[in-house]
Structure formats: C-alpha cells, structure tokens
C-alpha cells in the first residue's frame, strides 16, 4: 500500500517521525509524507482557497508546506505526490482528540480530508497533554490493530484513535467507543494592551475534566484502554418538523 502521512504538529514532530520509522521498519508499505512547516493545532478542516500554498522543503518522499493539515492532504492527493495513495494516516498527535475537541482538531481534519477523497483514513492521538509520548502503546496498536481496522473499513467513515499515555504494562486493551460530550477548554478570554499595536486577545482556559461514561472515548483512555471511534466524514442531517 502507498500510505500518506501527515499531522498538525508540524513535520518535525516526534509523533510523525515515529510513524515514518515504524513503517520503514516493517517495510510492508511505501510512505509519503506531506506535512505543515509548523504547528497547526486547532485548524480543524481549514483549507486555503484564496492564497497560494508555498512548498518549503522537498526531499525524496517528504514535502513540507506552508499550509494547513487539510491543505497537505488535498495537495498530496491532487498531484503533489506522484503515486496513487491508498491510505491516509494523520498523527501521532501529542495530546488527545476526544469529545468536542474533535471538531477543532487539525489531526482529525486531515484524516477527514482523506475520507472525502474516498480513501481509508485514520487519525491517531496520544493522551499526553504536551508531555513526552510513550510510543510503546502506539506500537502495540499499530502491530495488532492498524491493518485489521483499515482493511475492514467499508470506506464510509474514518477512524479516530486515542491512546493512553501510560506504561505499556498498564494498558488494558482496546475499546470501540463514541465521542464524549465534554469541551476541550473551559473557555476564558484574556486581553492585554500593546503600547504600539493596540489590544490583543487570547482564548485560554484550564484543561477539561472529561466525563468517564462507559462507551466513550474519554472513558476508555481514562481507564487504561485505547479508544477507537468510527466517524462519518460528512455531516448527518437531523430530523425536524417544518
């Protein structure tokens, strides 16, 4: 298979490098990397339509773009990568993408773009909250579940995988889940004045306390399980009376 790797943490991120090294070691697939030149967390499904996208670096099967994660996938599949891509893998993100923060996630947005191109796609994140990632659990998931899940996907959804950042001996297994309903941040607005450039604003807040309901992504990783959610890549309509 030809696999496209991307992320929203930037081409230099350790999670992306782990996937590159993992697939290079297994030698079962051909890898192409198209990734942003810097961190693009929170860019969701943002795509650049009214500006140019600059190629910052190209070495062999690596392309670095001054664009969003979705830009990277779109350009890769529209001809930047010279070979046909079979699967898209986005990550490994340093921090979870669960609950309502899935909406904001550039990691998930990139995988969703692969789905919109009718490709089997997966977003992978670790519940590390900016700390060093324990890649043993990621490797366990890749060894035992990655190919099975991709080959069993009929093509009408993407996978969102969240892995607890705990010692491998504490990992309890893998659970099929749905997103919880918690917010990423308890949003707060902070402002400050610059003497020469006016007023600035900063959306910030404390990390959330996610609900641990049975069957949710948050509940799984809080209790030591890898969470795997299947997500439709197109919005689904709601029933209502007119």
Image (tube, helix red, strand yellow):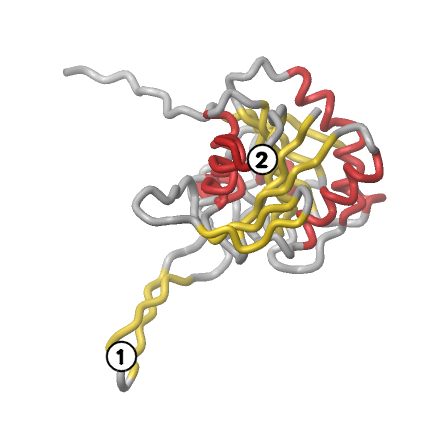
Quarter holding the C terminus is top left
Q: Residue at x 51, y 51 (%)?
A: 55
Q: Tell me residue 53's x, y (percent).
A: 42, 49
Q: Residue at x 24, y 78 (%)?
A: 198
Q: Residue furthest left?
A: 242
Residue 81 is tagged as 2
Location of residue 194 (image quadrant): bottom left
Would you place residue 239 above or below residue 10 in this image?
above
Q: Tell me residue 117's x, y (percent).
A: 48, 24
Residue 162 at least partly seen: no
Residue 197 is tagged as 1
Distance, label 1 to label 2, CA atoms, is 42 Å
Q: Residues within 10 Å of mark 2 (few under 14, many from 20)?
A: some
* Front one among 111 and 99: 111
Location of residue 235 (image quadrant): top left
Q: Are marks 1 and 2 in contact (CB under 8 Å)?
A: no
The mark nearer the N terminus, 1 or 2, is: 2
Q: Residue at x 49, y 39 (%)?
A: 99
């Amino acid at each position: 298979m030809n696999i496209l790797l991307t992320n929203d943490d930037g081409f230099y991120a350790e999670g992306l490098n782990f996937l590159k090294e993992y697939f290079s070691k297994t030698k079962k697939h051909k890898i192409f990397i198209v990734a942003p030149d810097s961190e693009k967390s929170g860019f969701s499904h943002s795509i650049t339509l009214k500006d140019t996208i600059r190629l910052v670096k190209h070495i062999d099967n690596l392309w670095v773009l001054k664009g969003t994660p979705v830009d990277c996938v779109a350009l890769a599949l529209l001809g930047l990568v010279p070979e046909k891509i079979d699967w898209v893998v986005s990550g490994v993100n340093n921090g979870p993408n669960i609950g309502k923060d899935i909406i904001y996630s550039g990691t998930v947005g990139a995988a969703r773009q692969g789905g919109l191109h009718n490709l089997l796609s997966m977003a992978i994140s670790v519940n590390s909250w900016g700390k060093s990632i324990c890649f043993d659990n990621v490797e366990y998931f890749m060894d035992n579940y990655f190919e099975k899940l991709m080959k069993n996907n009929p093509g009408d959804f993407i996978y969102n995988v969240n892995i607890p950042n705990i010692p491998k001996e504490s990992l309890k297994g893998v659970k099929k889940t749905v997103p919880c309903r918690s917010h990423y941040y308890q949003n707060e607005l902070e402002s400050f004045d610059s003497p020469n450039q006016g007023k600035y604003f900063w959306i910030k807040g404390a990390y959330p306390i996610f609900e641990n309901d049975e069957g949710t992504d948050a509940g799984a990783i809080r209790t030591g399980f890898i969470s795997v959610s299947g997500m439709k890549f197109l919005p689904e309509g709601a029933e209502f009376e007119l």
